[in-house]
Every structure is written in structure tokens, then in C-alpha cells.
Amino acid sequence: MNVRDVMSNEIEILPYHASLREAASRMQELNCGFLPVASEEGNRVTGVITDRDIVVRGIAKGHTIDAPVRESMSRKLHYCFSDDSLSQAAEVMQDEKVYRLIVLNDMQKKQFVGVITLGDILRQGETSLAEAAAEQISIKAA
């Protein structure tokens, strides 16, 4: 099974200039804790903002809730490709110590096409794969 078979592909993308308040509001409405952020031109994902970024990189560092997400977003993108296997995606998550990956269409175009989470892998019955990745991810957090 490939990433494209289980990823979420209807993902809202925040504009670079959106405020932390807007990000938090959208996360609440969508019941999620992670949103990709697009460049100023809006044609390319240049970062992600998480609920943790809003609090730890934003509010705790003195940014107001009206500050733009670009000041608090994670700029390092962890990604995989839509034709990667679930085990390849889990390995990237494990190596990068993250529970979610941006999904790009292919190595040449590198266009954003979705997001895959460890939960997506788990829901496919890949329990041992998900557990192994989660165990390695949590080692860093401990």
C-alpha cells in the first residue's frame, strides 16, 4: 500500500500572512493541530504551523495572537512522496521524530498533495509498523 492510498488530500493551507489567532481558529474548526503554510505567492508550502508552535514559538516568546504565522511556524518540512510505501513514510517519521509528514507528488515537481499521519498508518492495520515508529519517535521526546 502506498502513501497516496491513505493520506489526507483535502488539507487547508494557511497563507503566510495569516495570524496565530486565525491558525488556532482554523485548527479548532477543523479539529486538527497542524496546518501547512503557503508562501507569499501562495503557490508553494514553505512551512507548517502546529498548535504547539502557536504556544511554544509564538505566545511563550512574546508574540501576540495577531502576529503572522510565519514568525512561529516550523520551516523545516518533513516529507515523503505519494508513491512511497507506508513503511517508507513510517521510517521518515521515525528518523525525523515526527508524527505527520507533508506529502509531495514526485521528486521532480515536489508539489504538495496531502498529509500522512502515524494515525493514518495505524488505521490501515499496520499496527507493528506504527508502534515501532511511535516508540522511536517517543525516545527523543523522553
Image: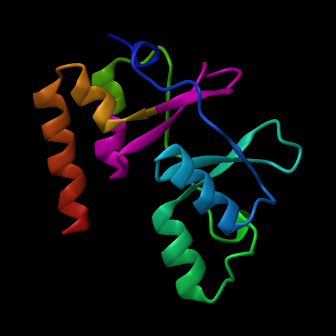
* Range shown magenta: 90-115
Q: How is the image coloured?
A: rainbow
- Answer left or right for 89 relative to 113: left
**Residue 100 occupies quadrant:** top left
Please, which residue is most extreme toward the bottom here? 62
* x 32%, y 22%: residue: 86
- Answer left or right for 125 relative to 103: left
Please, which residue is most extreme toward the front here? 29
Magenta span includes 93: yes
* x 78%, y 55%: residue: 16
**Residue 61 occupies quadrant:** bottom right
Residue 139: x, y in percent? 18, 60
Please, which residue is most extreme toward the left here? 128
Residue 91: x, y in percent? 29, 35
Is 51 placed above or below 58 here?
Answer: above
Magenta span includes 113: yes
Is 93 placed above or below 63 here?
Answer: above
Say which of 38 and 132 sits in front. 38
Q: Is residue 51 visible?
A: yes
**Residue 19 occupies quadrant:** bottom right
* x 47%, y 15%: residue: 4
Q: Which quadrant would the C terminus be assigned to in this image?
A: bottom left
Residue 127: x, y in percent? 13, 28
Residue 47: x, y in percent? 64, 52
Q: Is residue 74 visible?
A: no
Q: Which quadrant would the N terminus be assigned to in this image?
A: top left
* x 46%, y 47%: residue: 31
Number of residue marks: 0
